[in-house]
Every structure is written in C-alpha cells, then in structure tokens.
Image (tube, rainbow, N blue to C red):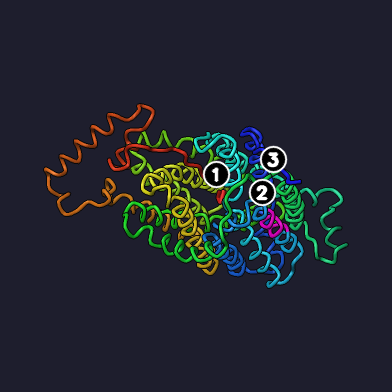
C-alpha cells in the first residue's frame, strides 16, 4: 500500500517551529562565546595563536559557504540541519575537553563546517513549508522577523548564562576547582558553557529530525549542483565588477568584519584584565555582549528613521559607520588610562559600535537588494558574508600579532573609518548601463523628469528617498522582503 504524503504544516505551526529551531541553534553560540577566548588562553595559547584559531573558523566558513548553499537542495533541509547540529555539538565537546593545539584547531574547523552547513536551510525550510501550504504569494515576513528575534534572544540568554556559570562555580565551596581536580585538569570552569552548549546541540538535532517534516519538492541532481558550484563562486566574485554601489557595499562588509574581528578578539582579555580574573572577566564580557545585542536591536529598529533624517539610505550608511568607528576609536583611546572615567568611556564606545553597525546594516542590505535581481540575491548575500568573514579573519591575525595597547584597537577603527569614507566621495549611485551620453545636460533632464513621474506614481507607503537611491530602473515591483541574519549576531 502506497503511503500518501502528509499535508504541509500550516503557516502558524511552521512559524513556531522555525522560531524554536532558530533559538536552539543560536543558544549554544551564546553559551560558549563569552568564555571562548579565555578558555583558549587558560589552555596555554597565546593571543596570536587564539587569533589563528578564529581564522580557522572564519576561513572554513568562507570556503564552504557558497559550495554548501546547494547541498540542502539535493539531500533536503532536514538532513543538512541535522548534520550541522552534530558537527557543532562534537566541536563544542572537543573544545571543552581538548588540551592540545591540534585538538582545539580541529574543534574550530568542525564548528566552522557546521556553521557553513546551517547557513540558510532552516529559513529555506520555513519558506518551502509556508509556500507549499499557501502558494508562492504566502506572507513570509512575520515568520522571518520572529526568527531574527529568536536568534537575538538566544544569544542574549546564552551569553548571560555562559558568562556567569564559571564565576558562580567559584563561589562558596568552589565547585569549579573541585571539578578541575577530579578530572585531572581536563574540565575547567570555563569548559562548562561549551559542554552545556553541546547538550543543547543534541536537543537541536532531535528537534530537527522530529519536528521539521520536509514538504514535497523536486529534487536536484548532485552532479548538476557540483558542476554549478564553480560558476556560482565565479559569478559571486564578479558581482561588484559591474556596479560601483555593489562594490562599495562589499568593501563596507569587509570593513565591518575588521571592526567585529578586532572587538571580539580583544574585548574578553581586556575584561579579564579589568576584573583581575578570567572567570569574573567572562561575567563582564557576557554583560557587554548582551548590551551589544540590545544596541544592535535598537540600531536596526531605528534604521528607517535614520535614513529619513539623512535624506536617503545611501547617506545614512556613512553616518552610521562613522558612529561605529567613533566607538571603536574611543575604546582605543581608553586603553591609555584607567579609572572610572575610562571605564565609562569604554562602555559608551562599545555601545556606539553596535548601535552604529545595527543602524547601518538594514540600510546597506536595502541598497543591495535594490541593485540585484532575485536570481542573484542569494549569491550577493553570500559574497557579502564572505567579505565580512575573510577581512575579519585577516584583521584578527594582524591584531593578534601587534603589541598590546591601543595599536590593535586602532587597526580595526581605522579600517571601519575607511569604510565610512568610501561613501563620502560618491553622491548618488550611477545608473547601470549609463553611456557617454548620460553626461549631457539634456539627457540628465530627461532622466530626472522620468524619475519624478515614476516616484510620484508609487504608493505613499514607500520611502521616496530610498526610491531615488534605487534609480528609476528599479521602480516597479519593488519588494521589502529583506531579512537580516549577528553577528554574527543578524542583525
């Protein structure tokens, strides 16, 4: 007897399950993030070696992100997500218990592979499921927004828990020291967040396998996907060659990666130096990371307001990046002195970094989505992520080898400021396909007349300044189905 395929989940159920699986995926990241650098240094690694470990992770994600993009189309969303979960929980267990450089490097490699595999399948599963139930015109924005909220909530809860756990174990009878003695130094108090994250990863795999049924879809041939990978990579690398605005957006993503790589590498050690111990430093870093997520959320929420006040999304981007660069340079300056004033200035600078980046991100992505069509949108986002990862890894390697003090912070701040200055030498984005005649005043007046008519005919709900930034060729079926994913932490 042939088994009939089950009906696809209704949108409400799919939305709840997508939210749950997103929360379970990001919770382990929040758990281990506050203690990761401190754990590696407790294992005897120098700051330069720690930067190399981060580079292993970032370069693995960068190398596999585009090739693994089509894998879920071949074997399904659920198997790829389950494989990502298994790799992540194995990496966290190895990270918590590993004592040698090779074992820890392997853990970072497995973690990077898991991150590359998990980039997209959950969201693709949600879109597939809702469209299988309600058709191609199904409403998606609510579920995607709730997924972003779930990831931010998981990171906030995880960082507070993971940062506080080692410190709490040191209170009273000092269970952390007893655990270290009982395990002959294998399990440190700083290992507990990663072990807890590994347990959550097991729950993630179980949830994926039992609660995410695959909707029916046409399978793709593995040979076709493998043959298409080089073309996809080359197409992504050529993305910015024909459009100056897209090229600027990719360079900006690299500048943001440099800033985040610097902050993530240097902040944990500075927090430990301020408190005098690794465990209490992890608590301080957890509080800072949670505050960073809040500032990112506030900045993202304010992005449309900032664009209106600036006159357009393109003018808002350098202003927001300038705020973030000011925050990073403030952190650089506060290294030179100590005391309450320095701590207050450092906290303000840290908040400005994430507030500015949070406000810049939606405006950058809005410009990007208006310059690329649907066929190249996923590739554009992947290349943007690659730029962030690669430049972040390179900056971390350089910063880790610079002498302690303001110089490593200055590196990230300078690169981010350069990213902001890229936008100041350009006014309005060039019209694609504009030829030599475009410089003729009569031609320009005809362009402006066409543009005014087109803008006046669009619904009032759309922002006129954003339409002007998009150019008249994009006026028509404009979509605002953009979602942002944290920096890590999605925005």
10 Å crowding of disc 3: few (<14), some (14-19), many (20+): few
- Percent of width and height locating residue 119: 58, 53
Q: Which mark is residue 344?
A: 1
Would residue 127 be counted in the magenta stretch? no
- Percent of width and height locating residue 288: 60, 46
Question: Which numbered mark, 1 or 2, is in the foreground of this view?
Answer: 2
Q: Is residue 37 visible?
A: yes
Whole-number angstrom distance, CA of label 3 to CA of label 1: 58 Å
- Percent of width and height locating residue 387: 46, 59
Q: Is residue 405 visible?
A: no
Residue 14 in the figure: left or right of residue 245:
right
Q: Which residue is mark 3?
A: 6
Whole-number angstrom distance, CA of label 1 to CA of label 2: 34 Å
| Identity of the residue drawn at 58% across and 58% down | 71
Q: Which residues are magenta?
A: 82-89
Q: Residue furthest front?
A: 1
| Identity of the residue drawn at 36% across and 53% down | 246
10 Å crowding of disc 2: few (<14), some (14-19), many (20+): many
- Percent of width and height locating residue 345: 51, 46
Q: Nearer the viewer, residue 434 or 287?
A: 434
Q: Nearer the viewer, residue 200 or 163?
A: 200
Q: Secondary structure at mark 1?
A: helix
Q: Which residue is mark 2?
A: 25
N-term mark: 3 or 1: 3
N-term mark: 2 or 3: 3
Q: Nearer the viewer, residue 191 or 19?
A: 19
Question: Which numbered mark, 2 or 3, is in the foreground of this view?
Answer: 3
Q: Are circles 1 and 2 on residues that touch, CB within 8 Å?
A: no
Whole-number angstrom distance, CA of label 2 to CA of label 3: 26 Å
Q: Secondary structure at mark 3?
A: loop
Give the main secondary structure of the magenta stretch. helix
How many marks do you count on the picture?
3
């Amino acid at each position: 007897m042939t088994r009939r395929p089950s009906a696809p989940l209704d949108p409400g159920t799919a939305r709840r399950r997508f939210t749950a699986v997103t929360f379970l995926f990001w919770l382990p990241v929040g758990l281990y993030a506050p203690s990761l650098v401190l754990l590696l240094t407790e294992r005897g690694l120098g700051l330069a070696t720690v930067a190399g470990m981060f580079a292993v992770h970032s370069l693995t994600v960068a190398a596999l992100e585009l090739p693994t993009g089509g894998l879920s189309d071949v074997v399904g969303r659920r198997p790829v997500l389950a494989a990502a979960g298994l790799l992540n929980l194995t990496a966290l267990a190895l990270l918590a218990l590993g004592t040698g450089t090779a074992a820890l490097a392997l853990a970072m490699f497995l973690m990077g592979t898991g991150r590359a595999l998990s980039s997209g399948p959950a969201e693709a599963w949600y879109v597939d499921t809702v469209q299988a139930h309600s058709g191609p015109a199904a409403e998606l924005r609510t579920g995607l927004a709730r997924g972003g909220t779930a990831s931010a909530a998981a990171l906030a809860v995880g960082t507070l828990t993971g940062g506080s756990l080692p410190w709490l174990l040191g209170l009273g009878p000092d269970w952390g020291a007893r655990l270290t003695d009982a395990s002959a130094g294998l399990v440190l108090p700083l290992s507990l967040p990663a072990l807890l994250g590994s347990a959550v990863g097991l729950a993630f795999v179980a949830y994926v396998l039992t609660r995410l049924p695959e909707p029916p879809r046409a399978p793709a041939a593995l040979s076709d996907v493998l043959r298409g990978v080089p073309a996809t990579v080359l197409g992504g690398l050529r993305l910015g060659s024909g459009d100056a605005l897209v090229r600027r957006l990719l360079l900006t993503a690299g500048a943001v990666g440099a800033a985040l790589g610097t902050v993530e590498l240097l902040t944990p050690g500075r927090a430990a130096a301020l408190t005098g111990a690794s465990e209490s430093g992890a608590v301080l870093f957890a509080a800072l990371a949670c505050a960073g997520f809040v500032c990112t959320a506030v900045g993202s929420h304010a992005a449309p307001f900032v664009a209106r006040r600036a006159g357009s999304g393109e003018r808002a981007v350098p202003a927001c990046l300038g705020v973030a660069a000011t925050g990073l340079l403030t952190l650089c300056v506060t290294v030179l002195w100590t005391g309450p004033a320095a701590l207050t200035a450092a906290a303000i600078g840290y908040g400005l970094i994430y507030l500015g980046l949070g406000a810049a991100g939606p405006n950058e992505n809005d410009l990007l989505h208006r310059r690329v069509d649907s066929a190249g949108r996923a590739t554009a986002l992947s290349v943007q992520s690659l730029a962030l990862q690669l430049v972040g890894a390179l900056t971390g390697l350089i910063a880790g080898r610079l002498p302690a003090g303001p110089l490593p912070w200055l590196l990230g701040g300078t690169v981010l400021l350069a990213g902001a200055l890229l936008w100041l030498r350009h006014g309005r984005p060039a019209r694609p396909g504009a030829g030599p005649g475009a410089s003729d005043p009569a031609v320009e007046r005809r362009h402006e007349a066409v543009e005014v008519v087109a803008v006046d005919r669009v619904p009032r709900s759309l922002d006129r300044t954003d339409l002007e930034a998009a150019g008249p060729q994009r006026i028509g079926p404009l979509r605002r189905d953009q979602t942002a994913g944290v920096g890590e932490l999605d925005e």
